[in-house]
Image (tube, rainbow, N blue to C red):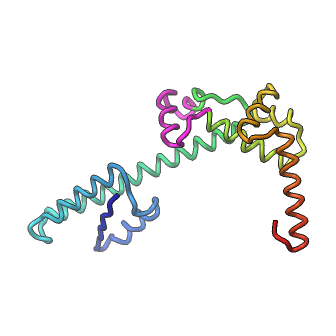
Amino acid sequence: FGLVWVEFGGANSTELVRHVVDRGGPLFSGSIFRDIVELCTSVLYQPSQLDPKNSAILYQILMCLCSRLEDQAVKEYIDREILTFIDENLGRKLTLTETARHFGYHPAYFSARFTRTMGINFSRYLNDRRMRRACYLLMTTNWSVDRIAHALAYYDVSHFIRRFKASEGTTPLRYRRATQFRSQKEAVNDTQGGSP
């Protein structure tokens, strides 16, 4: 870990700070950190603080910050778009290849990028999102397990039940009963002024 403090003054310094803060804050890691450390070090070793080379180096630092922030903002936007697309398509068969092509990526590149970004692979993420949606539907609707399974693109109900049990440690019906009981108990405690 390391910390580099860079302070800028001048007529446009307020705009620069706003640009940096609006795009995630002034903390950086990875290659941008190394680049900025090198540039800051070169400023420190100039014979005079008024050396014209310092202006050029400081300009490079600013351009480095701004370009990397723009790149990061674009990546974060694309990642949010991908996750939104997945959530909006939980109710149909969705494949990694289809999702990759929808966003203009080669499936192998998309798979590696998705795993690196999310920390789990695409199929595991998709299954986890479906299980979260199944839990929500079990708690908030009276839909049958069969209807929930079909709504989440599981056309074999027994397969859905096995997946749910592996994820949640219980069957969908037991999960529903347990959450309904918990909700009723919390409602009684709230009306009586007690804590759950």
The picture places residue 55, in percent across and down from the top left corner, at 19, 64
The picture places residue 101, in percent across and down from the top left corner, at 55, 29
Instruction: Using the rendered view, name the quadrant where residue 164 is placed.
Output: top right
Quadrant where the C terminus lies? bottom right
Does 183 lie within the magenta span?
no
User: Which residue shows up at 27% across the image and 53% down it?
Assistant: 35
User: Which residue shows up at 59% across the image and 29% down it?
Assistant: 96
Relative height, residue 127 to residue 43 (above, below): above
Between 22 and 150, the residue placed more toward the observer is 150
Relative height, residue 70 to residue 105 (above, below): below
User: Which residue shows up at 66% across the image and 30% down it?
Assistant: 94
Q: In the picture provided, is 73 more to the left or to the right than 122?
A: left
Quadrant where the N terminus lies? bottom left
Between 133 and 63, the residue placed more toward the observer is 133
Between 15 and 152, the residue placed more toward the observer is 152
**Type of secondary structure dominating the magenta stretch:** helix
The picture places residue 156, in percent across and down from the top left corner, at 80, 25
Relative height, residue 183 to residue 144 (above, below): below
Relative height, residue 17 to residue 36 (above, below): below
Count the marks.
Answer: 0
The residue most toward the front is 169
Does 122 lie within the magenta span?
yes
Task: Provide the residue span drawn in magenta.
Answer: 100-123
Instruction: Using the rendered view, name the quadrant where residue 147 is placed.
Output: top right
Q: In the picture provided, is 76 more to the left or to the right than 179?
A: left
The picture places residue 189, in percent across and down from the top left corner, at 87, 67
Q: In the picture provided, is 128 more to the left or to the right than 54?
A: right
